Image: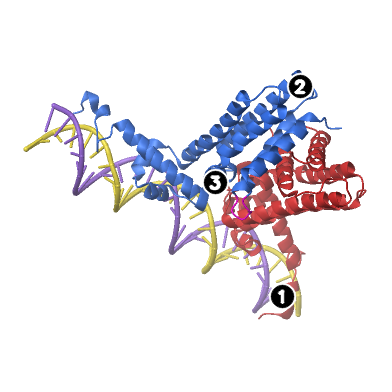
Chain colours: A red, B blue, C purple, D yellow
Amino acid sequence: MKVNNAENRRYRSRTTAERRTERRDKLIEAATEAFASDGYSNTSIEQLCSMAGISARNFYEEFGSKEELLHTLYDDINVRAIEAAASALAKADPLDFKTRARAGVTAYLKTMTADRRMARIAHIESVGVSAAMEAHRQAALNVFASLIKQEANRLAKIKLAPKRDFSLTAIALVGAIRGLAVASVTPGDKPQSLEKIAAEATHLIVAAILQSPA
Amino acid sequence: MKVNNAENRRYRSRTTAERRTERRDKLIEAATEAFASDGYSNTSIEQLCSMAGISARNFYEEFGSKEELLHTLYDDINVRAIEAAASALAKADPLDFKTRARAGVTAYLKTMTADRRMARIAHIESVGVSAAMEAHRQAALNVFASLIKQEANRLAKIKLAPKRDFSLTAIALVGAIRGLAVASVTPGDKPQSLEKIAAEATHLIVAAILQSPA
DNA sequence: GCAAATTGGTATGGAGTCTTACCAGTTTAA
DNA sequence: TTAAACTGGTAAGACTCCATACCAATTTGC
């Protein structure tokens, strides 16, 4: 007979919500490792379950599909990185362009490259997976570009930058920052310090926004 | 009985080599269309054969696998674009930095975005496909970065740019140029003129190389 | 203790794919 | 004309994988 508080029943000293969260976390950790090392397409749901130590049924209780799990992973790292950048920007001196640029890009890169598996998933494994994932990824890139564009417009308004359309500049800068992020987590390359990479990115951002293209 | 000149035997007025080339071309065109619209992973070999109007056996005579076909497509567009850039650079005035940058990047973008399907394949569909493809793609990106780095070093030698390590700058610029290329072939966005995009890229290249990061 | 809830593991059906092999028909060269 | 070469289509076997269903075993609350 079904009881009212079935939802709150404990199992192995954990509530339903706790058990689900734990399974979810285990799956996320397993997927982070598997997607980054074997690649998204080469990883099967069965393999993920085996690594996470849960059954296939539990998998489908948490995620509707492998792609949904990738989607979650992507947002995990990407949203965090962009929010870190936005938050750093918000805290920085509104009148010191260079310091702001450095703070924002450093926060982004620091968050994004803290776990190289995550960076790989966000910038490589998530690319070209499906039409839905691609739309989501493009939207996320647009958010990042908008953040840069918005800041550039703000600077233009207070005469710290020329007034112009920064759309293409923002797109280019997003590409540059992503390129640096990927390079900094690619094993083959010599590991560059975060400071050097952030300095390079800062330099590029300031140069791109301060001067008008001829 | 096998005759000696079987290789040169004609069929439908075509030599063996001609027939193979024609099939190859048909497969490449079919793959360009299918990979760009349906995505690489969603395209089956059977589908490619059907589109190209050839049999599965012929497919395997030309390409060992679907990935080998993608590999060919990738090189097709990417090598051409980088060579176009290098060639434009070689022809440009060795002392006029800005003109050189514009010539190089315009040649690259023009070649890369001439067929938006190709651009999509090179920058999206080829990403994260397999370890082998990924290594190949990274190597190609490094070639592009080296081209930029080499030019920057040349400029430094003749005192048109500061002398420093341009490795990270080159990586960032490759990312920026790729970002612009992808944006210019993404349907949703308003189609920007090649001139505007090239101008933005030129501006960024000049700014990044001329000034030293603080 | 016992019924209900929950678990991991296993099994299963179905779909999709790759790759090779075969076949009947067409075209060629002699 | 005729044998050999070549063709497109189809079939088949072997995989892999997804997604669901089932089951025996464990744990819980009462």
Residue B160 located within the stretch drawn in magenta: no
At horizontal 52% and vertical 46% (from top left) the residue drawn is B117
Graded by Cα atoms within 10 Å as few (under 14), some (14 to 19) or many (20 or more), the crowding at tag 2 reads some
The disc labelled 3 sits on which kind of residue?
A: Arg
Q: Is residue B29 left or right of residue A128?
A: left
> Gap between marks 1 and 2, in whole Å?
73 Å
Q: Chain of mark 2?
A: B
Q: Position of residue A211 (x, y in %)?
A: 80, 40
Classify the position of the N terminus of chain A by image quarter.
Answer: bottom right
The numbered disc on residue A6 is 1
Q: Viewer-nearest of labels 1 and 3?
A: 3
Stretch of the chain drawn in magenta: B186-191
Q: Both on one chain, marks 2 and 3?
A: yes
Which residue bears the numbered disc 2? B156
The disc labelled 2 sits on which kind of residue?
A: Ala
Can you tell which quarter of the image residue D28 is in?
bottom right
Graded by Cα atoms within 10 Å as few (under 14), some (14 to 19) or many (20 or more), the crowding at tag 3 reads some
Q: Is residue A137 left or right of residue B24?
A: right
Callout 3 secondary element: helix
Q: Nearer the viewer, residue A16 or B26?
A: B26
Q: Mark 3 and mark 1 in contact (Cβ < 8 Å)?
A: no
Which residue bears the numbered disc 3? B116
At horizontal 47% and vertical 48% (from top left) the residue drawn is B33
> Gap between marks 1 and 3, in whole Å?
56 Å
Q: Nearer the viewer, residue A162 or C3?
A: A162
Q: Position of residue B142 (x, y in %)?
A: 64, 30
